[in-house]
Image (cartoon, helix red, strand yellow):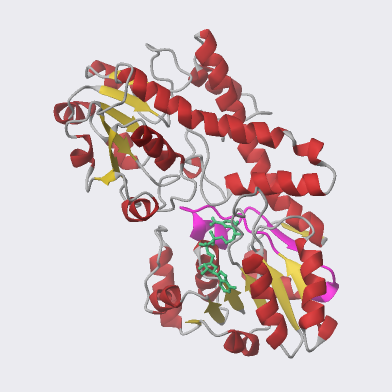
Amino acid sequence: MTVIGTGYLGATHAICMAVLGYEVLGVDVDPRKVEALASGAVPFYEPGLPEKLTEALESGRLRFTTSFDEAAAFGDVHFVCVGTPQAPGSHAADLRYVESAFAELAKRIDRKALLIGKSTVPIGTAERLTEMVHGLSPIGQELELAWNPEFLREGFAVKDTLHPDRLVFGVASAWAEAQLRAAFSPILEAGTPLVVADLASAELVKVAANSFLATKISYINAMAEVCEATGADVQVLAQALGYDDRIGSRFLKPGLGFGGGCLPKDIRAFKHRAEELGVGQAVAFLGEVDAINTRRRTRTVDLVRELAGGSLKGVRVAALGAAFKPNSDDVRDAPALDVARLLYLEEASVVVYDPEANENAHKAYPDLDYADSLAEAVSGAQVVVLLTEWQQFRDADPEHLGALVANRAVVDGRHALDADRYRAAGWEYRALGRPTASTTVRLVEHESDSVALTLS
Ligand SMILES: NC(=O)c1ccc[n+]([C@@H]2O[C@H](COP(=O)([O-])OP(=O)(O)OC[C@H]3O[C@@H](n4cnc5c(N)ncnc54)[C@H](O)[C@@H]3O)[C@@H](O)[C@H]2O)c1
């Protein structure tokens, strides 16, 4: 099999498939990525993946190339995993990379093969690409197309790839289904539930799942806004709601909300596509979900400003976290960096520290200052704001941090710190949706939901 596009999704897929025993050729247009992977280096932070890459390379079953000629000659099935970012100046998905990858393969493949899209795309894309592929291919309709949406979460990518909750095969023929079954046989044999669907349903599963999860996060954050206006405590509320089996506690965790390279752009593209299809009203609520999520960022800045005494000008703020969630160095649409940027725009002196994402953050926001350690970041800070809930920040000792800061004031943007411990150590502690003097409430923690919980 080939895997076209070896970013987060594609590299993980290629590596795991080779570990499972398949002969895999990874293809990317970025020669630096190809070189790094071929030399055994994963170009992003993903726990457990470097070890799997070593294992796969040592098995001799995994290679990388930039050549589509080589890919077309090599594969019986081709997984397309290229990016589908938000289009510039629009909420639509930018499909140029997907179109280019399918076209480059279609022009070259000269024996019966299956092209499988894994990228997240607007509904109707697979059908449109099928026509394009048939038009370009020297073997016409012998070149088939299927869609196999991917649900892996960064930070849990290896586990999610090898042991997914379910597999979804969007197919147009029994032959395509058989190819997909063969391509995932070890995972299916392990008892993984499989849903075989038409192409449109397969495309829709992915965006519908992300929309549901985004809605659940924004729902509790909307309740946080109501709490802020009434003196109620959103943590108490989340705890009480979560005990209801019909609601459940997962993703019902208030805070700074979701970000990353998938969720925000996926719900926007879904809404955009639904409008094109004439069913915009059905998902109009996703606009609210997005707006609630974005408001959490400005509201976090409000809390920092309040703790700073009303103005941020010249105030030294330690911004803890830059990645869109812990266990990742991905800063695409990261709420943490957005907050840091907003603080900077109000002329705060912001020092950012993230255990893994400083380098990517610096590339995205070179104007911000970056520290090399937690201690360096908080030294002399007038306000500390927790923006990404890395374990290191959860575990930090409030007494120890208190000795380093200029002023014991903390905004807990992720509801991740022990409010009672911080207050006992003389800190002024604030969190979104919580009254000023509220005590710690233990929300159920699912490590894999770490926020904003995760997904993609
Ligand atoms: N990252 C995730 O956790 C995740 C999870 C599920 C689904 N997805 C979806 O998977 C897709 C890829 O996401 P990602 O996060 O891996 O993106 P990414 O930006 O990390 O990787 C995309 C890769 O595709 C390469 N590429 C671009 N055009 C190419 C072409 N024509 N031929 C070959 N390679 C090409 C890029 O160089 C890059 O390495 C997106 O649709 C995304 O929504 C991502």
Q: Is residue 158 magenta?
A: yes
Instruction: Judge left or right: residue 128 versus residue 400.
Output: right
Q: Please provide percent x and percent y for residue 292.
A: 58, 29
Residue drawn at the location 39% of the way across and 31% of the way down: 416
In this figure, what is the number of numbered marks?
Answer: 0
Instruction: Judge left or right: residue 113 versus residue 368.
Output: right
Q: Is residue 291 visible?
A: yes
Position above or below: 266 against 320? below
Q: Which quarter is ligand 1 in?
A: bottom right
Q: Is residue 177 visible?
A: no
Q: Nearer the viewer, residue 213 or 286?
A: 286
Dividing the image into 4 quarters, which one contains the N terminus?
A: bottom right
**Residue pushed farthest top?**
230
Residue drawn at the location 22% of the way across and 45% of the way down: 373
Position above or below: 312 against 365? above
Q: Please provide percent x and percent y for residue 417.
A: 35, 28
Q: Please provide percent x and percent y for residue 383.
A: 27, 26
Q: Nearer the viewer, residue 315 or 353?
A: 315
Q: Is residue 35 magenta?
A: no
Instruction: Judge left or right: residue 44 versus residue 230.
Output: left
Q: Please provide percent x and percent y for residue 336.
A: 41, 39
Residue drawn at the location 56% of the way across and 61% of the way down: 161
Residue drawn at the location 80% of the way across and 59% of the way down: 124
Position above or below: 295 against 337? above
**Residue pushed farthest left?**
403
Quarter occupied by residue 301: top left
Instruction: Judge left or right: residue 18 versus residue 327.
Output: right
The magenta segment = 148-175
Position above or below: 63 against 206? below
